[in-house]
Image: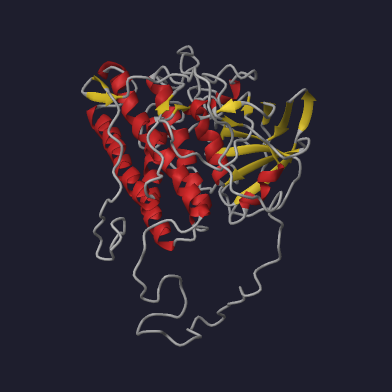
Amino acid sequence: MNRVLLLAIGLFQAGVCLPAPADVVEQNGYNSAPYHGPYTGTPTITGAATAPATLAASIAPLPPNPTATYYNADGTPKEPMPAPYVPAGGLGTNGTEPRYMVNSDWDFESIALALYQEWIELDLFHDGLARFSDEELEAAGLGLESRSLIEFMANQEVGHATLLTNMLGEAAPKQCVYNYPYTTVREWLDFNQRVTRWGESGVWGFLSHLDSREVSQMLSQSIATEARQQMVFRQMSGLSPMPVWFENGWPQSWAWTMLAPYISYCPENTTRLAWQNFPTLHILNNPNTNRLAPNETKQDGSEAVGDRIADPSISNITDSESCISAEGIGKSCSAAIATNRTEPLSYPGKRVYFQWDAPGQAVGPNNSYVTATTAGQPKFVGWSSQLNFTYSLLTTTGQNQGYTEQPEGFVFEDDGIINGTIAVMLTDLDLFVTPFNTTMVNPHIVALGLYQAG
């Protein structure tokens, strides 16, 4: 029996050892790694992981699968049942004993990316609890019970990392050292809800494409927890916990582009990833979640704490401008189970200003990955939200600068197409894509950003 096999009776035998925990510092009864800062060395290797050969410049679009023709007009079974109460069809339903291991390069690279994500969340959730005093945490609305919940969510990541490590085997990536952008509790919470957004969406995007259905099953049970974490951090940030009817799935390269800038360096021989790092799209007037009037966010990019792709909103604004201490329904954005804003963070027709980086920037662990794009000149802005991928026209105003208007539309009934924390990108083509094939847009992406729509 393979020692890393998860048996059908539910016993997980961890055949791969996790790395010994890093040295930690302790404050307020919580532990965190001793260093969170930039990498200052010289990378010994650069670029994404490569295969022995690459067969084409991009995946060519094809017509619908000719065998995907099943339609049931009257709602009764059409094929013989393999057993009582078991309709014909399904994957992995023929009685074969499950093998809970990755089963292709696609699987390995996807689960390795997910493990990089679990490692940063484990460190990130602990770090804020240790970095800030009890008084600072209390002032941000995090009482003892809330802090205990965050600690529990950090401990969940131990289980997630153990699970993914065992499904990868001995080449599983190890925990790294990270470089965070926040200096206040509010900024930490805001950053947490952004990190868990791409952590969740980055898995929904590849989950149904995994060759190993067994791995997909395990990861589904992990990412369901991640979704709850994202909602909790939105609540703690004073945002609506779930402003959408559907969550959005992202290709792996989007999630890796978001994550990589916050990894400082990794242990020697840490497994590298094959996914693309896109240039950063800076959203200059990304709504400041701490403002009483988000539409008054400055248009020069100065209301993000830095210039990395998912840096949180600054929280050091005047009391008269801030919603943190505001009172009344529709005004306060303090931590709460649910929050409604009289003035929304964004709205259809809002003019959104952009500045974007050129490719060729060093990012990620040990500054050893390089941003790249295969796209031509940007012409459109792509908005990936809920079940939709919507385009608006880009107006270029200067060198790597421009703007657009936030699109209007609905998914179903009164469910607006754009809300929550979403991926926004510049493209050279308004290619039609749907949730199952969003990856097809990657060759056309000029730059990628994270937008706080609601």
Relative placement, left or right, of 195 versus 1 is right
Q: Can you give x and y, in whole percent of width and height, for residue 119 in the image? A: 38, 36
The answer to whether residue 296 is visible is yes
Camera-nearest residue between 28 and 109: 109
Relative placement, left or right, of 388 versus 95 is right
Q: Can you give x and y, in whole percent of width and height, for residue 15 in the image? A: 28, 51
The residue shown at (37%, 52%) is 167
- Identify the image's colour scheme: rainbow, by chain, secondary structure or one colour: secondary structure
Taking 325 as reference, is 377 above or below it? below
Q: Can you give x and y, in whole percent of width and height, for residue 187 in the image? A: 43, 23
The residue shown at (37%, 19%) is 35
In this view, the residue farthest toward the top is 318
Camera-nearest residue between 107 and 225: 107
Relative placement, left or right, of 2 versus 383 is left
Which quarter of the picture shows residue 175?
top left
Q: How many marks?
A: 0
Taking 100 as reference, is 257 above or below it? above
The answer to whether residue 419 is visible is no
Taking 438 as reference, is 424 above or below it? above
Q: Can you give x and y, in whole percent of width and height, for residue 335 in the image? A: 36, 29
Which quarter of the picture shows residue 344?
top right
Q: Quadrant of the N terminus?
A: bottom left
Taking 335 as reference, is 70 above or below it? below
Which quarter of the picture shows residue 21?
top left
Camera-nearest residue between 211 and 280: 211
The residue shown at (42%, 70%) is 92
In this view, the residue farthest toward the left is 29
